[in-house]
Amino acid sequence: MLQDLVTHVSATLVMQKDLVKAIDDATVISRWRIGVAVSTKDVENSRAVLDERKNDDFQQRKRYDDMRACLAELETGQYDAQGKKKMAEGHLDGIKGEMGEFKKQRDQFASLQEFLHTKCTQNGQAAGTARTLELETTGNITMMPLICMLKELVTEVVATRLVDDQDAKTLKAVMAKIEAAAENIKLKTESSKSLEDFFAPSKKLDNFIPSYETDFF
């Protein structure tokens, strides 16, 4: 619709240009006729006609200029609309790209959530088992399964890249300290024959703490 309007305005401008040329020709002829007039009345009539022609010429030129300005405004509006359309398309592409990144992060969180659910279930079961063993007179109590699950959890979190490099290094360093501490505990408990020797209870609590014969790790 806009293109049809521009075409119509252009055709009208051409017609106006032809009309201005015809007015210029008529003005030249009128001047020639005034030059050969033989009476004052003819001269006055010719001047009146010339003034009228000049006024028409002025009006036509003004209309011609107004239509040219309108055409320029329409063309500018058309270019602006195209520019805004390109900007909107670029913005839409950016939004699509962000949605793709959000989907990737959602998939990573879903994978981590499933892993955490599995490990938390295992930890709960292990805790229940440890409580059961605690109530028994004898049993095999170990920290290694819990430490192994904790190490798997740290590895999974780092693998999903949900933490930055510095935090990943910190997690790995803390995990290494935990493993070293567990190994130290293991070495200490290997020489112990019972939980009483390991925890070294006071004599006042001998009647309240049962004696366990255990194998650690």
Image (cartoon, helix red, strand yellow):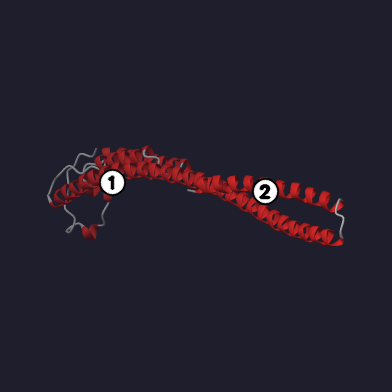
- One can see residue 58 in this view: yes
Which of the two discs, 1 and 2, sits closer to the camera? 2
Judge whether residue 191 can be spotted in this image: no
Secondary structure beneath dot 1 equals helix
Identify the residue at horizontal 26%, vertical 57% (top origin).
Answer: 202
Residue 103 appears left or right of 19? left
Badge 1 is on which residue? 113
Q: Quadrant of residue 192?
A: top left
Q: Quadrant of residue 158?
A: top left
Frontmost residue, 47 versus 70: 47
> In front: 136, or 108?
108
Q: Which residue occupies the foreground of this view, 3 or 196?
A: 3
* 74 left or right of 22 in image: left
Give the crowd class for mark 1: few <14, some 14-19, many >=20 residues within 10 Å: few
Instruction: Tell me which residue sits at (23%, 57%) in the image.
Output: 203
Q: Residue furthest front?
A: 38
How many labels were placed on the picture?
2
Q: Which residue is mark 2?
A: 19
Q: Position of residue 31 (x, y in %)?
A: 82, 51
Q: Amino acid at mark 1?
A: Gln
Lower position in the chain sequence, tag 1 or tag 2 = 2
Q: Amino acid at mark 2?
A: Leu
At mark 2, the secondary structure is: helix
